[in-house]
Each structure stands twice: as C-alpha cells, then as structure tokens.
Amino acid sequence: MGYIYRQYADFQGDLAGADMVLMSAAEFNAGGKNLIGVPIAVTPDGSEPQEPEEGEML
Amino acid sequence: MSYLDYLPWFYADIPEIAAVGSAFDAENEQLIGQFAMIPRDAVISTAEEDRILQWEKLLGIIPQDRTLVQRRMMVLGRLKGAGKLNEAKIKSIVETFSGGDSIVSFSDSTLTVRVAPPEWGEVFLFPDVEKALAPLVPAHLNLVVERYYNTWEDRMATYGSWCALKTGYDAVTGDMGTDCPTTNLAVNGDFSSGTTGWASTTGTMSVIDFSIYDTVFPIPCSAGLMDFLITNGDDVLWLFPDGTISTADRPSKTLTEAGTVLLFCTNFSAANLIINDAGTDARYLGDLSDLPPLTYWLNLENCTNITGDLSDLPPLTYLLSLNGCANVTGDLADLPCLTGILSLPDCPNITGSLSDLPALSYTLRLSGCPLVAGAYTSVNGANVPTYTYLNNTGLSAVDLDNTLIAYAACTRNNGTFSAVGMTRTAASDAAVSNLTGRGWAISGITKV
C-alpha cells in the first residue's frame, strides 16, 4: 500500500514517513526485535510482504 | 443421387444426356424442398405464409401487421367459430389465442368475455380476440372483451412511477387495486395473502406466481449499472423499475433513472446463498435493515452510500464484507456470529472491542476503523485468520501484544498480519519470533 521498505542491514536510523524497516525472521531474532520507535516488517525470508489480491481474501 | 447415377456410366460422356441430367437435378432439388412443406401446410398452426394467405382470402381476413403466428391464431379462431355460438365455443376461440381459460357472462344484452392470464404470455394481438368473436355475436347483443389480468402498463398507468407504485403498496397495506383482487405485495415485508401477480416486458405478458415467494429484497439504486449478483438462489426473479424482469443470477441491468429493483427468490436463508453487489458500488442506496434473512454470505464492498447499523444485519455465518461503507454504524458486539471472513475496512463509525469477535478462520479486516480497540484473543487452534489487517485502528500496545500472543498460540502457519500505525511492546517479542518462524509476515508495527 505504498510503503517503502528499508533493508534492516542498511538501516542507519533515519526513516521517512511512509517507510518501514524490513527484516527476516532470523534478523529479528538476531537483534532486530530490539529496534524501537520505527515500524518494522518481518517476513520469514526478509522479502517484502506480498499484498494479496482483493478476491484472495474472500 | 443425381439423374446420371441412374444411367449406365458411359451416358455421362454424352453432352446432351449430361445437360438433361443437370436440368433435371435442379428441378428435383426444388421439388424435394416442397415435399417438406406439405405436412406443415396441412396443419394451420404450422402452415407457411403462402398457405395462411390462402386461408385468409377464403375467410375474408385482412393480414394487417400481424406476425405469422398471430395470423395462424386468427385463422384458427375464425374456423372454430363456425356453427352455433355458445359458451364452450367462445372459450374455445379465446383459448386459440391465449392458450388459457376465459370467463363468459351475459347480462343486460351484453356478452362479456374476460380473458384469463395467457398461458404463453401475450404473444397474440389482444384486439384479435374481439375480432374473431364479433362476427359470431348476434347483432342485437353488445360484445365486451377484456383482460382479466393486469399488465405493467396498467400498473404504471395507475401509479405513474415505480416509486409511487412502491409507496402505493405500503399505503394500502399491499392491495394492488380492486381490478386485481388476488394480488398483494408488501415491498419491505412478506407476501402474506397474495397468490398470483403479473408482470410484463413491453408487448409481452408473463405470468408470475408470487405465492411461492415469502420475502423480497428491495434494492434502491441511483441511475446506472445495477450489478447485484445472487448465487445458488432458487426461482430467482428480478423486477426492474422500467417494468422488465429477469431470471438471471446476474442481470447487470443499467437503470436509466433511479429506482428500486426487487429481487425475489425462495431460499434467501439457504446455507450456500450468496449476495454480492459486484459492480453496483456507490449506486446502491439501501439500508442494512432491508436485507433479506441471509445466513451465509453478504458482500457489499464499496457500497459507500449504504446506511444502517450492524445490529440490523441478518444472521450471517460465514462472510460479511462492507469495505468502505463509511455511513454504517454499530458495535462489533452486534455482529452476527461469523466463522470465516469479516471485512469492514474504512468504516470509521464502527465501534467496539475485538474481544467480542468470534474466531475467524480466513480474514479479519478492520483497517481504518479508529474506534475499534481491544485484543483479539478468541482465536484457537486453526481458527485464526490467515489474513489480518488492523492498520490505523484504536488498539493499544497491550491490545496488540495480547493479540499477537494469542495468534502465536494457534496452529496455523503462513499468515499475514498487518497493523500499520500500531505499537507493541517487548511482551510480544517471542510471539513475533514464533509466528515469523512459522511463515507469517508481520508488518507495520512499531515497538515502544
């Protein structure tokens, strides 16, 4: 929905309004869970979350 | 076979014989075509135009603008009129046209013939009935031939518009009028005492047995595409404001002006019946309180002008989708007990706590509902939504912690959980770790 994902490995601490830090499950367990104050997206392999089609959710 | 096939082969090399054969074959082919017409022409109801023309000349009938079918009826009607005129003969003549019954009465030197609803619709020219009877009636008697049924044109002539028709029904408690005493219709209610009603498209009469329906779904719409879809409905019937009808599941009717479409079916409460607005969207102007007693699936996505309260909803059990229906009000506690899908994004007037929701098995969408709060903890086992969208809701960090912890305790793998604009605390770290380790994608949440 128009989000811009910043890779956790490249994250320097600054994030624009609609940005989100993207990390894998392994990165989350390896320290990403301690990231505070920024929205994050965690997926099993660190790929961007896939937005399902409208009909897919019905 | 051709002419030459009946001769020794060497005749084919003689030019004169070949020419004779060719001429014969052409004539023979035409003759075979004529043979097929003989049995058809022997019966008036199937006779071709040339034979009907001969009958018309014989009986002194002027074809006028009748179709071939109507001309056949006129010939049959005139032939049936031979001999002494009595009630049985009159009924027989009328039956030739309508395929149905008639009521014959006599008083004050007037012979009155009332034609009952036609068996096949009004495919005949109604004035032809009187034209067939008139020559048989003695000169000192009057003859009156009238319909004993109503056309939509009759109804519209009485009420002026579809809306007035609807209002008229409500105002007179369902009575359609004295000339149609057996038909009652309550737009927002039941067909309690009605038996038979009639509707027609222009020029063609259809007879509808309304007694089979006990519920009607009124669908008020603005002008444009009325694209409602019904799936698994029995005896589906749509009545449109212009007087036309349809029995299709998805008639995709374009309304030239605003009006109320009436949807009839005999099993609105069936366990597999689906109502979907499809592409109607903002043109649907209805209220949740007018919905039929659905028990399974209602999708009114993007019907942004719909009004009503969640407490007015029918007892749905699987799916409710009211995406973008910003006028809808109500509390989550008033929802029917759904098991599969609840989709109410961008319904900002909806209030309540997620704790009042049952365990959904497929989708929960409440993004853009800022008055919704609470933790969703009724999930259990595999009964947890595969897709969960709680973006920009009123959930607190503790609500979200408890929700994630409840999800992690479930057995379903590979889901999507989005809560953009929401916060959580370290209390749900283990839950997020557990879920993402089992294939879940969790996004949008800020840890505080």
Image: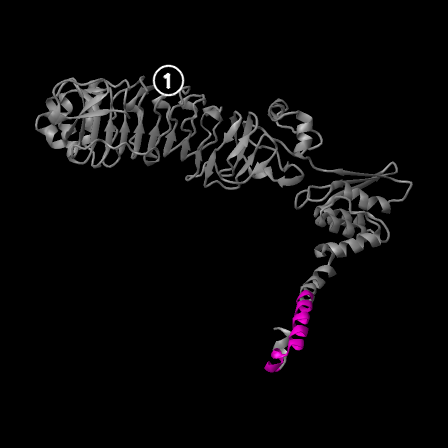
Amino acid type, mark 1: Asn
Q: Nearer the viewer, residue B354 or B72?
A: B72
In the picture, the quarter occupied by the C terminus of chain B is top left
Point 35% across, 31% down: residue:
B338
Q: Nearer the viewer, residue B380 or B282?
A: B282
Residue B102 in the image: above or below residue B328: below
B29 horizontally vs B128: left or right: left
Residue B155: give x, y in percent of width and height: 67, 30
B204 horizontally vs B429: left or right: right
> Where, by quadrant of the figure, is residue B42 drawn?
bottom right
Q: Is most of the magenta stretch helix, strand or loop?
A: helix
Q: Chain of mark 1?
A: B
**Disc 1 secondary structure class:** loop
Name the residue beneath numbered marker 1: B349
Q: Nearer the viewer, residue B386 or B181?
A: B386
Q: In the rendered structure, does residue B313 fall within the stretch colored magenta?
A: no
Q: Say if residue B339 shows up in the picture.
A: no
The magenta-colored residue range is B8-30
Q: Residue furthest front?
A: B15
Residue B23: give x, y in percent of width and height: 68, 70
Residue B153: give x, y in percent of width and height: 67, 32
